[in-house]
Image: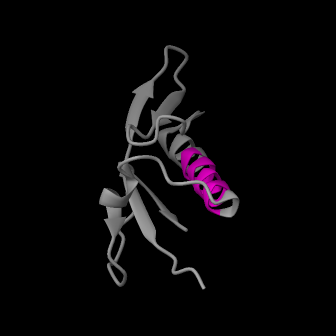
Amino acid sequence: MRVKRTYAFTVDFEQEEDGRWGVDIPAVPVCAASGFTKEEALENLQDLTQGYFEMLVECGDPLPDGIDSSEIPPGTEVMLNSETVTIVI
Protein backbone atom coordinates (compact mmCIF):
# COMPACT_ATOMS: atom_id res chain seq x y z
CA MET A 1 0.00 0.00 0.00
CA ARG A 2 1.32 3.43 -0.96
CA VAL A 3 1.61 6.02 1.79
CA LYS A 4 0.04 9.34 0.84
CA ARG A 5 2.24 12.41 1.05
CA THR A 6 1.38 16.08 1.14
CA TYR A 7 3.33 18.63 -0.89
CA ALA A 8 3.07 22.43 -0.81
CA PHE A 9 4.24 24.74 -3.58
CA THR A 10 4.73 28.48 -3.61
CA VAL A 11 2.95 30.17 -6.52
CA ASP A 12 3.49 33.33 -8.55
CA PHE A 13 0.60 35.56 -9.62
CA GLU A 14 0.50 38.00 -12.52
CA GLN A 15 -2.41 40.20 -13.50
CA GLU A 16 -3.06 40.41 -17.24
CA GLU A 17 -4.01 43.62 -19.08
CA ASP A 18 -7.62 42.43 -19.33
CA GLY A 19 -7.84 42.06 -15.54
CA ARG A 20 -7.62 38.27 -15.39
CA TRP A 21 -5.05 36.62 -13.14
CA GLY A 22 -2.43 34.11 -14.20
CA VAL A 23 -0.77 31.84 -11.66
CA ASP A 24 2.01 29.29 -11.93
CA ILE A 25 4.22 27.09 -9.78
CA PRO A 26 7.92 27.86 -10.40
CA ALA A 27 8.92 24.38 -9.11
CA VAL A 28 6.51 22.70 -11.58
CA PRO A 29 6.74 24.66 -14.87
CA VAL A 30 4.06 22.57 -16.61
CA CYS A 31 1.40 23.73 -14.12
CA ALA A 32 -0.13 27.15 -14.83
CA ALA A 33 -3.71 28.43 -14.81
CA SER A 34 -5.77 31.61 -14.99
CA GLY A 35 -9.01 33.03 -13.66
CA PHE A 36 -11.06 36.20 -13.37
CA THR A 37 -9.97 36.54 -9.71
CA LYS A 38 -6.88 35.45 -7.81
CA GLU A 39 -9.00 32.93 -5.93
CA GLU A 40 -10.40 31.42 -9.14
CA ALA A 41 -6.93 31.21 -10.69
CA LEU A 42 -5.55 29.51 -7.58
CA GLU A 43 -8.46 27.05 -7.46
CA ASN A 44 -7.93 26.19 -11.15
CA LEU A 45 -4.21 25.68 -10.51
CA GLN A 46 -4.94 23.51 -7.47
CA ASP A 47 -7.18 21.21 -9.56
CA LEU A 48 -4.71 21.06 -12.44
CA THR A 49 -1.73 20.30 -10.22
CA GLN A 50 -3.57 17.61 -8.25
CA GLY A 51 -4.60 15.89 -11.49
CA TYR A 52 -1.11 16.15 -12.96
CA PHE A 53 0.55 14.55 -9.95
CA GLU A 54 -2.10 11.81 -9.70
CA MET A 55 -1.48 10.98 -13.37
CA LEU A 56 2.29 10.77 -12.78
CA VAL A 57 1.77 8.37 -9.86
CA GLU A 58 -0.76 6.21 -11.76
CA CYS A 59 1.61 5.89 -14.72
CA GLY A 60 4.58 5.11 -12.47
CA ASP A 61 6.43 8.19 -13.66
CA PRO A 62 8.78 10.04 -11.31
CA LEU A 63 7.81 13.36 -9.78
CA PRO A 64 9.60 16.39 -11.26
CA ASP A 65 13.14 17.03 -10.01
CA GLY A 66 13.36 18.75 -6.64
CA ILE A 67 9.81 17.92 -5.55
CA ASP A 68 10.82 15.69 -2.64
CA SER A 69 12.48 18.67 -0.96
CA SER A 70 9.01 20.24 -0.61
CA GLU A 71 7.49 17.21 1.14
CA ILE A 72 5.64 18.02 4.35
CA PRO A 73 6.17 15.45 7.13
CA PRO A 74 3.10 13.35 8.05
CA GLY A 75 0.98 14.91 10.78
CA THR A 76 1.99 18.47 9.90
CA GLU A 77 -0.97 20.84 9.68
CA VAL A 78 -1.09 22.48 6.27
CA MET A 79 -2.25 26.09 6.17
CA LEU A 80 -3.75 26.97 2.80
CA ASN A 81 -3.39 30.55 1.65
CA SER A 82 -3.30 32.60 -1.52
CA GLU A 83 0.44 31.99 -1.92
CA THR A 84 0.42 28.17 -1.81
CA VAL A 85 -0.95 25.15 -3.68
CA THR A 86 -1.13 21.94 -1.65
CA ILE A 87 -1.63 18.46 -3.07
CA VAL A 88 -1.91 15.01 -1.53
CA ILE A 89 -0.77 11.97 -3.48
Q: Nearer the viewer, residue 61 or 68?
A: 61
> Does 56 appear in magenta?
yes
Q: Which residues are magenta?
A: 45-57
- Give the number of callouts: 0
Query: What residue lies at 30% left-to-right and 58% top-to-bottom?
Result: 69
Q: Nearer the viewer, residue 59 or 10?
A: 59
Q: Give the prevailing secondary structure in the magenta stretch.
A: helix
**On screen, residue 17 above or below 73:** above
> Does 83 appear in magenta?
no
Query: What residue lies at 37% left-to-right and 36% top-to-bottom?
Result: 12
Asked if residue 70 lies left or right of residue 17, the reply is left
Rendered location of residue 19, percent (x, y): 52, 22
Q: How is the image coloured?
A: one colour
Query: What residue lies at 55% left-to-right and 16% top-to-bottom?
Result: 18
Q: Nearer the viewer, residue 44 or 4?
A: 4
- The quadrant in which the C terminus is found is bottom right
